[in-house]
Image (cartoon, rainbow, N blue to C red):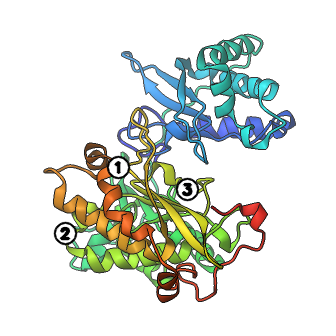
């Protein structure tokens, strides 16, 4: 998302990512791999791409002479059995990037599991072979490939024409000031910014997308990119245009009440609303959590803003719940004649390269009890954390048991509780919860 605009990047990985995409998309041989491959490119040390969970992670770096190269990681992934990607090569010259990526794909093509779909991912091949043997196979395959990648120039500074009046002082509009603080990233190109536009719970209707495209053209955006947290980014907006851009976004319903990248900006999967694999509908839970957070923690927003909540409707981790500060995946539990829509709750996940870790399970809770359970966890954090301790460090210090005990009461329910609390209804729904194909979903 920040390729070419971050003042902290080694170099712009965008052209390399585009070259790799075009190369493999145009070679039909790579359209029939054992299963999908996710390749992530990252130019910054902050790791916005989550290299640690990608099938192939490509990290840009500079040596002591400021010559560019890549570090290549392989075998990351989430779903029901998450793995952290392992280092394939400490230094891959930029000219050998495509040859290296192609060698990885060829090894996967030749040795990947084609008989069991659940194990037909690169992470299992790396696990089965071991990283040393996998590395040897890749390097041997790479010797057969003399393809040399292009070297691309450093990202260009923006010099677009602009209209409007400069912001000579902090604006008096409080909402606009808050938006500037939470939804703007100042680029390395002087006076230019990247503007994050939220897709509420990952959704935007066609009219909003059309309006955003029109706004992007009107305000001379360099491009529009998607983020890994289900938002959109307008890049290359001159600071003189931010006030008018804000008004245009607000007029078209593209200003969310939830600050981008903060705790109320919840990531969720498509869920049972449109996915056959999902147990639960994540939208209702996400809305309930947003409401609870706004009502209960408004005065503590700065202390909890960096906590990330992610909700998947099943264990497949499409919303990346495994790396969330607080993550959930849906399932169904039996209670007499009822099925109870429920979530497994995880805490302490971290997606950062070099520190990637997966959340620890602390309980399985009915969907309608989740908001209160999250409220309790956050109150424990605010009450017991050390000075300036973030949520990830807190959960690892106190351990999962310290957070499991306060949630035990939410996991237990009598037949009377099921009826009294409507636990047989999914969050946000008035219908009795059911699964059309029980054998497919295999409820717990």
Front: mark 2 or 3:
3
In which quadrant of the rendered view does residue 193 lie?
Answer: bottom left
Would you call the spot at circle 2 few (<14 residues within 10 Å), some (14-19), or many (20 or more)?
A: few
Point 52% across, 34% down: residue: 84
Would you call the spot at circle 1 few (<14 residues within 10 Å), some (14-19), or many (20 or more)?
A: some
Q: Is residue 440 left or right of residue 247?
A: right
Please report contact status of discs 1 and 2: CB closer than 8 Å, yes or no.
no
The quadrant of the picture occupied by the C terminus is bottom right
In the picture shown, does residue 427 fall above or below 118? below
Q: Distance of mark 2 from mark 3, alpha carbons?
A: 29 Å
Q: Residue at label 1? A: 400
> For the residue labelled by badge 2, is the local secondary structure a helix, a strand or a loop?
loop
Front one among 354 and 16: 354
Q: Residue at label 2? A: 169
Front one among 74 and 433: 433
Q: Distance of mark 3 from mark 1, alpha carbons?
A: 37 Å
Please report contact status of discs 2 and 3: CB closer than 8 Å, yes or no.
no
In which quadrant of the rendered view does residue 95 lie?
Answer: top right
Q: Is residue 336 left or right of residue 435?
A: left
In the picture shown, does residue 390 fall above or below 272? above
Would you call the spot at circle 3 few (<14 residues within 10 Å), some (14-19), or many (20 or more)?
A: some
**Labels 2 and 3: the sequence-earlier one:** 2
The location of residue 214, given as percent across then percent down, is 58, 73
Q: Is residue 181 left or right of residue 19?
A: left
- What's the mark number on residue 225? 3
> For the residue labelled by badge 3, is the local secondary structure a helix, a strand or a loop?
strand
The location of residue 222, given as percent across then percent down, is 52, 55
Point 71% across, 14% down: residue: 137
């Amino acid at each position: 998302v920040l390729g070419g605009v971050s003042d902290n990047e080694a170099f712009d990985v965008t052209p390399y990512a585009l070259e790799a995409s075009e190369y493999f998309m145009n070679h039909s041989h790579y359209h029939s791999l054992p299963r999908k491959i996710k390749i992530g490119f990252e130019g910054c040390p902050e790791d916005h791409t989550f290299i640690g969970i990608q099938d192939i992670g490509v990290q840009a770096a500079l040596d002591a002479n400021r010559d560019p190269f890549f570090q290549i990681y392989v075998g990351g992934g989430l779903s029901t059995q998450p793995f952290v990607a392992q280092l394939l090569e400490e230094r891959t010259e930029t000219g050998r990037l495509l040859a290296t990526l192609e060698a990885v794909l060829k090894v996967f093509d030749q040795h990947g599991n084609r008989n069991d779909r659940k194990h037909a991912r690169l992470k299992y091949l790396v696990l089965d072979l071991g990283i040393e043997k996998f590395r040897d196979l890749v390097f041997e395959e790479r010797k057969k490939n003399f393809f040399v990648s292009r070297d691309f120039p450093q990202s260009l500074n923006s010099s677009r024409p602009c209209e409007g009046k400069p912001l000579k002082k902090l604006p008096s509009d409080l909402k606009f000031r808050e938006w500037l603080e939470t939804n703007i990233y100042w680029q390395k190109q002087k006076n230019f910014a990247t503007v994050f536009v939220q897709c509420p719970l990952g959704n935007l209707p066609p009219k909003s997308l059309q309006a955003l495209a029109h706004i992007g053209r009107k305000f001379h955006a360099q491009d529009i990119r998607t983020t890994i947290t289900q938002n959109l980014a307008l890049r290359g907006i001159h600071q003189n245009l931010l006030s008018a851009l804000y008004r245009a976004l607000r007029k078209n319903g593209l200003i969310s009440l939830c600050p981008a990248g903060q705790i109320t900006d919840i990531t969720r999967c498509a869920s049972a609303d449109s996915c056959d694999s999902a147990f639960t509908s994540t939208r209702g839970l996400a809305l309930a959590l947003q409401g609870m957070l706004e009502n209960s923690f408004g005065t503590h927003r700065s202390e909890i803003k960096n906590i990330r909540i992610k909700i998947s409707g099943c264990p497949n981790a499409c919303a990346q719940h495994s790396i969330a500060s607080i993550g959930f995946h849906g399932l169904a539990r039996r209670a007499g004649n009822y099925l109870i829509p429920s979530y497994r709750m995880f805490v302490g996940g971290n997606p950062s390269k070099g520190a990637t870790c997966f959340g620890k399970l602390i309980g399985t809770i009915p969907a309608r009890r989740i908001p209160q359970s999250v409220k309790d966890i956050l109150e424990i954090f605010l009450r017991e954390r050390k000075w300036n301790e973030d949520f990830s460090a807190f959960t690892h210090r106190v351990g999962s048991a310290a957070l499991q005990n306060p949630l035990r009461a939410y996991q237990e329910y009598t037949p009377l509780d099921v009826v009294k609390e409507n636990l047989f209804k999914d969050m946000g729904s008035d219908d009795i919860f059911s699964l059309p194909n029980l054998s497919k979903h295999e409820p717990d």
